[in-house]
Image (tube, grey):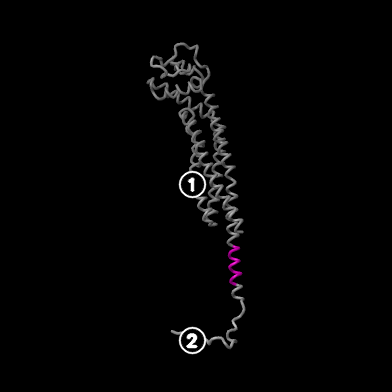
Amino acid sequence: MAISANCWKYLVLIFNVLFAMSAVVLFGVSGWLLYRLFIYRHFIGVNVEYPAILLLMMAIITCSIAWIGWRTATSMHQIHVTITGILIILVVVIEFACFVWAMVVWDGVDLEIKTNMASYLQYTLGNKEDSSYDLLRWDKLHKDMQCCGVTGPGDFLHTNNIPVSCTGKGILDTLAQKPYVSDHSAIFQQGCGNPLHEYARQQLMLVAMTALVASVLQTSGIFCTFFLAHAIRLRRRASIRNSSSLREAALSAAPDDSLLSPSAPAHTLPKY
């Protein structure tokens, strides 16, 4: 039983090393995906970022649980090992819930993005400062997605001020560049709603797949941890049985026949 328990102990230790490494990878991937969504947060809305934020938090928590799992595996306390297994179950369940959440957001992100973009466009057009941060955000979106407005350049026609970024150039590309387009022949005819929608769906799909893969791979730690707890319990029972057997053997030893032996020393009363 001791050999079996030691085998499970080393397996759990190896798992916790891999668990910590997966947490580092998960932290990097989720942070990168969160950044890719964050740079367009004014257009896609904050709700789209929540699954990536949850995944990033779980990466930090996973590092802590990996450290706890290492300490409990080396100490070989059954109750502590069991608690660690329960914590790993919670991590796996939350990561799988993050996968489901990302897929739900992925399915309904189209309406939310276009609603946010339309309201943000109205806010931007109401701001008369050409150098405002809002215009710079639209400038970046137009150049990155090679698009114009929400549904197309028609979103700016009623103001007769189509941003120069709708041609692929930004208002900061040159100091002599005017912020609005005079030649409409080079304007992107595609609106930014559909490209940004596809972009957000891609990032959410990556978040969902990352959460799913992490939850599936980390499931192996649940079995290793609970098998270690079971092996510790069996080893403790075996140790108790051995101790009882030795105690019974000592009690059932040959009776003391010193009273029958003539050479045995006489018993004396205890001194007080």
Element at label 1: helix
**Residue 113, horizontal then vertical, whole percent:** 51, 28
Badge nearest the viewer, 2 or 1: 2
Residue 191 point in image, percent of width and height: 52, 20
The type of residue carrying mark 1 is: Ser
Query: Looking at the picture, how far across and down is residue 194, in whole percent?
Result: 54, 24
When the figure is inspected, residue 215 is found, relative to residue 168, above or below; the finding is below
Question: Label 2 sits on what residue type?
Answer: Leu
Foreground pick, 129 / 39 = 39
Tell me which numbered mark, 2 or 1, is placed earlier along the sequence. Answer: 1
Q: CA distance from mark 2 to mark 1?
A: 65 Å
The quadrant the C terminus occupies is bottom left
* Residue assigned mark 1: 64
> Helix or strand or loop: what does disc 2 sit on?
loop
Q: Nearer the viewer, residue 156 or 206?
A: 206
Density class for disc 2 (Cα within 10 Å; few <14, some 14-19, many ≥20) is: few
Magenta highlight on residue 151: no
The residue singled out by tag 2 in the image is 269
Q: Nearer the viewer, residue 5 or 218?
A: 5
**Residue 221 to residue 31: above or below:** below
The foreground one among 251 and 266 is 266
Where are the magenta residues, as a range? Answer: 237-247
